[in-house]
Image (cartoon, rainbow, N blue to C red):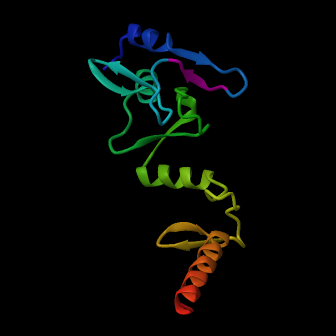
Amino acid sequence: MPVETNLIERLMQSVSPEPNSGCWLWMGYVTKGGYGRTKVASQITYAHRAVCEAIKGPIPEGLHLDHLCRVRCCVNPQHLEPVTQVENNWRKNLAVTHCPAGHPYDLENTYWLNGYRSCRACHRIRQFARNRRLRAALCR
């Protein structure tokens, strides 16, 4: 089913191309999470999905669009790749290079527990504090 040209034109009115990265930044409504939102056929949808479907066609069933550029408000179809939810989550997690405390996720400082990365430095700090509390409780 061909998409109406006026839909593409309407969507592109809210897009601002970024010349250095090639991102098409969504200038309309953006969620707290950083994703653009718009209304298509009286339904609210993500802007990157709407633009991608308007230009490239339907997204295969069960797949999510991964932002290869890692810019959530980017709607450039060349920066979006349909992947499974598992693959999308895996890619997002690998993009995180440091734990919340700022320690690097590298070979020496990272261990895996139940499929999740954990920080050895933070684990040592937690264990040290736990042992100190236990010793204090025993000395009372």
Displayed quadrant of residue 5:
top left
The residue lying furthest to the bottom in this view is: 139
Q: How many marks?
A: 0
Q: Nearer the viewer, residue 115 or 126?
A: 126
**In percent of the image, x 58 and y 40: which residue is there?**
68
Residue 3 placed where, x, y %?
A: 36, 16
Image quarter where the N terminus lies is: top left
Residue 58 higher or lower than 132, as above or below: above
Displayed quadrant of residue 19:
top right
**In percent of the image, x 56 and y 81: which residue is there?**
133
Residue 4 higher or lower than 35, as above or below: above
Displayed quadrant of residue 103:
bottom right
Residue 28 placed where, x, y %?
A: 47, 18
**In percent of the image, x 35 and y 27: which residue is there?**
45
Q: Report the side of 140 relative to 46 (left or right).
A: right
The residue lying furthest to the front in this view is: 140
The residue lying furthest to the left in this view is: 42
> Is residue 18 highlighted in magenta?
no
> Is residue 23 highlighted in magenta?
yes
**In percent of the image, x 48 and y 36: which residue is there?**
33
Residue 13 higher or lower than 113, as above or below: above
Residue 12 placed where, x, y %?
A: 50, 13
Q: Which residues are magenta?
A: 22-27
Residue 59 placed where, x, y %?
A: 38, 35
